[in-house]
Amino acid sequence: MWSWWKCGTKMPVKILSPALQAHYNQRHRTKAFLLKITARDQTVLGVTGESQSITYNDGAGEVVYSAMIGFGDVAMEQSAGLEVSNTEVTMLYAESGPFSQSFINAGNLDYGRYIIYQVNWADLTMGHEIVDAGTIGIAKNVDGVSAVIELRSL
């Protein structure tokens, strides 16, 4: 949950559940990134860089975040100005999974929406932190083996 105007400041403030904040304050944490994508046709897809898939309900329904080979932590390229922040995610195709070459080449992800959560994978009841959210630019084939998905922050 975001609170954009807290205590009269104009700085975005993240509000975490007390349990998740306490977990973040520990020395050893079990954090995972979850990328939730809503395609143009409203199909919801989830991916994680963890070694096992994670099933998580963000309040809008349960989504299985597939463990994808080639998908790692999202590298954020944040801007200091007012322009849109861009991130690119690279992942290997999975012909049996949601991100097949034909699915990407058909443009199904282009101009969809995304949200990136960070959760405690060992205790999902702690809730989530919203790391980033926005729209998808273009998802494109790189080399026949992987795709690059452009994430455009709000």
Image (spheres, grey):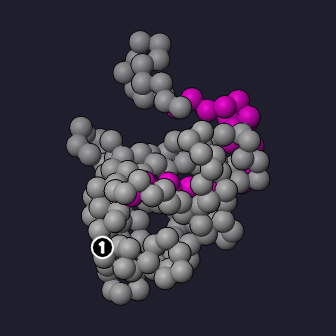
In this picture, is 15 found above or below 30? above
Please give left or right for residue 66 compared with residue 116 in the image: right
- Residue 72 image offset from top left, x and y in percent: 52, 67
Which quadrant: the C terminus? top left
Magenta run includes residue 29: yes
Picture quarter containing residue 126?
top right
- Residue sitting at x 37%, y 21%: 10
- Residue 29 image offset from top left, x and y in percent: 72, 51
- Residue sitting at x 38%, y 51%: 113
Magenta run includes residue 94: no
Count of picture labels? 1
Picture quarter containing residue 67?
bottom right
The amino acid at mark 1 is: Ala
Q: Find numbered disc 1 in the image and state the secondary structure of the residue it sits on.
A: loop
Picture quarter containing residue 104?
bottom left
Q: Closer to the camera, 118 or 82?
A: 118
Crowd band around label 1 with a 10 angstrom C-alpha radius: few (<14), some (14–19), many (20+): few
The answer to whether residue 109 of the structure is visible from this angle is yes
In this picture, is 74 found above or below 25? below
- Residue sitting at x 23%, y 43%: 83
As drawn, which residue projects farthest toward the bottom?
A: 144
The answer to whether residue 25 of the structure is visible from this angle is no
- Residue 66 image offset from top left, x and y in percent: 59, 66
Q: Which residue is mark 1?
A: 106
- Residue sitting at x 41%, y 71%: 90
Q: Which residues are magenta?
A: 14-39
Q: Closer to the camera, 11 or 152?
A: 152
Please give left or right for residue 30 compared with residue 71 in the image: right
- Residue 65 image offset from top left, x and y in percent: 59, 61
